[in-house]
DNA sequence: CTTGCGGTTGACGTAGCGTCAGGCCCTACC
DNA sequence: GGTAGGGCCTGACGCTACGTCAACCGCAAG
């Protein structure tokens, strides 16, 4: 029976000799014999096995899975079906990723009317895009779209001032907390009332008690927000949430 | 200024301490100071930098690119646009892959009417699915669809016999070649004539000289085919092609 | 005898950490 | 004063599928 050397196999199949030696090392494809000086020689069966291996590799399967298949330990159809599922998952992931990246680019390019960036003020642009989906889950499309429209209706100057307004809230709340005020105290509740009014403005509608509480919960529950607030002042997220809860209890 | 320990940062941001040490090691995020016993301490600026890093990481950027961005060496928008392109490429790749895998599964499950598997007899099922696109490029949709219809119109027994017919051609050609016949010699041309007729049958139409020559060229030019034929007999692909060219010259 | 080709066996590098193993420092408890 | 425990540290290996040297060997041609 005719055999082929490494170089011949590389010319025939297009794989490198390094790959052949790798497959030998991991036991995926062993030469039919190794002669004088360790030279590998492959037979017809090995060529055919290599064909199958390369086919499955081009389908994106991992080498250990391929080994199971060509050794007959795993039915090919089953493996491919599982692989197809994984591919679908990966496609979905990439789709979502691409959408988020596109939204981030739009925001960075200053198209401020595209998404209601004020919803998650305190987070940088890209993060806001990411959280728009979260917002739609939490409060529904109608609320988010209304907020979008409301911000869009503002003048450019008003829009640009939004982050500063939030920053003002945060600063004042941090000061009050530093001077010993509780979240339910009068001065703090006054700031929270302003906060509520401003949220209503950028949302385009007055949040229900539940929605407002949900926003507060987001501040403390999501590490991204907590971190942002904690960078301003330690424990500010929890403090603000407490104030929002108290405000909702008393006024909504 | 307040600083945070490793554990605090992990609680705030959700990253593991191992990740923080890794970022330190590669210079992506260094602690503001390392005190008694090498303990890392992070300041407000580091927290904010980490926020940006994590955001960009969730967008799928690589750490070295992220480093360039947060260090100001690379404009964020530019990097994201390039990243978006890469994502698109990757999505296209995955889409094609998923389609090929799906086609392979269909063939393995015995739905032989789905694709004209005889077009690339000698290649295994998955490979045929892969080459259908190549066939449509080479010969056009009409030809491929006609072949599909022709095979579909055969009886199941006829269909199952197709690979054996090709195998017979290959065996006889290898024998003739082994006994010294040239590709243009009478006995070889007789087999090629049968080959042509059989191709015409599975194609559903008589191939033009150009199409038949193209098929022969595919046998020798594509390493996948060459390998398959060479596994039957060395140089068989070139021999068959030569015979097909001679046949086209003389008869088409 | 030298050169060159074709092949060999290590061994490191890749991305981004997870996961031990082993050790140090500080605090609380007995 | 000894010890247990918690929190943190520094290596170092593992994962995927090879690419890419480096060093070496056998055989044939010049």
Image (cartoon, coloured by chain):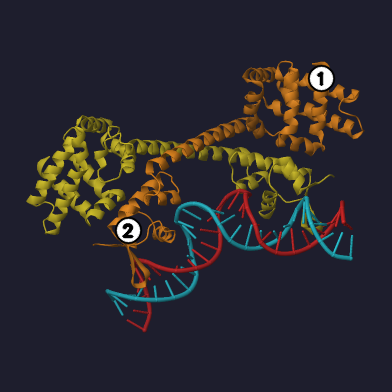
Chain colours: A orange, B yellow, C red, D cyan
Residue B247 image position (x, y, % from top left): 13, 45
Name the chain under label 1: A
| Marks 1 and 2 in Cβ contact (< 8 Å) | no
Q: Nearer the viewer, residue A211 or A64?
A: A64
At a point 31% along the width and 49% down the height, the residue shown is B224
> Which of the image's four quarters has the N terminus of chain B?
top right
Tell me the number on the disc at residue B5.
none
Residue denoted by label 1: A249
Q: Is residue B26 left or right of residue B192?
A: right
Q: Is residue B32 visible?
A: no
Name the chain under label 2: A
Q: Residues within 10 Å of mark 2 (few under 14, many from 20)?
A: many
- Which numbered disc, 1 or 2, marks the residue closer to the eye? 1
Q: CA distance from mark 1 to mark 2?
A: 77 Å
Residue B235 image position (x, y, % from top left): 22, 56
Residue D11, picture quadrant: bottom right
> Which of the image's four quarters has the C terminus of chain B?
top left
Q: Residue furthest right?
A: A179
Residue denoted by label 2: A9
Residue A21 image position (x, y, % from top left): 41, 61
Q: Is residue B64 left or right of residue D27?
A: right
């Amino acid at each position: 029976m005719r055999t082929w050397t490494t170089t011949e196999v590389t010319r025939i199949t297009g794989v490198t000799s390094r790959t052949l030696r790798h497959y030998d090392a991991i036991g995926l494809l062993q030469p039919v014999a190794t002669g004088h000086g360790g030279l590998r020689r492959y037979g017809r069966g090995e060529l055919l096995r290599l064909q199958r291996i390369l086919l499955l590799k081009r389908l994106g399967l991992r080498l250990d899975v391929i080994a199971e298949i060509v050794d007959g330990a795993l039915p090919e159809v089953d493996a491919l079906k599982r692989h197809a599922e994984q591919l679908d998952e990966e496609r979905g992931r990439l789709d979502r990723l691409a959408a988020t990246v596109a939204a981030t680019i739009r925001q960075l390019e200053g198209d401020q009317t595209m998404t209601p960036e004020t919803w998650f003020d305190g987070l940088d642009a890209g993060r806001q895009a990411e959280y728009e989906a979260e917002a739609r889950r939490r409060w529904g499309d109608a609320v988010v779209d209304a907020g979008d429209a409301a911000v869009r209706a503002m003048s450019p100057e008003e829009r640009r001032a939004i982050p500063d307004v939030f920053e003002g809230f945060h600063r004042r709340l941090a000061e009050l907390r530093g001077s010993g005020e509780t979240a339910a105290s009068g001065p703090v509740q006054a700031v929270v009332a302003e906060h509520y009014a401003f949220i209503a403005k950028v949302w385009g509608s007055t949040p229900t008690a539940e929605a407002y509480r949900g926003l507060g919960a987001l501040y403390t529950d999501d590490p991204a927000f907590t971190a942002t607030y904690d960078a301003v002042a330690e424990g500010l997220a929890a403090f603000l949430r407490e104030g929002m809860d108290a405000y909702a209890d008393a006024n909504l």
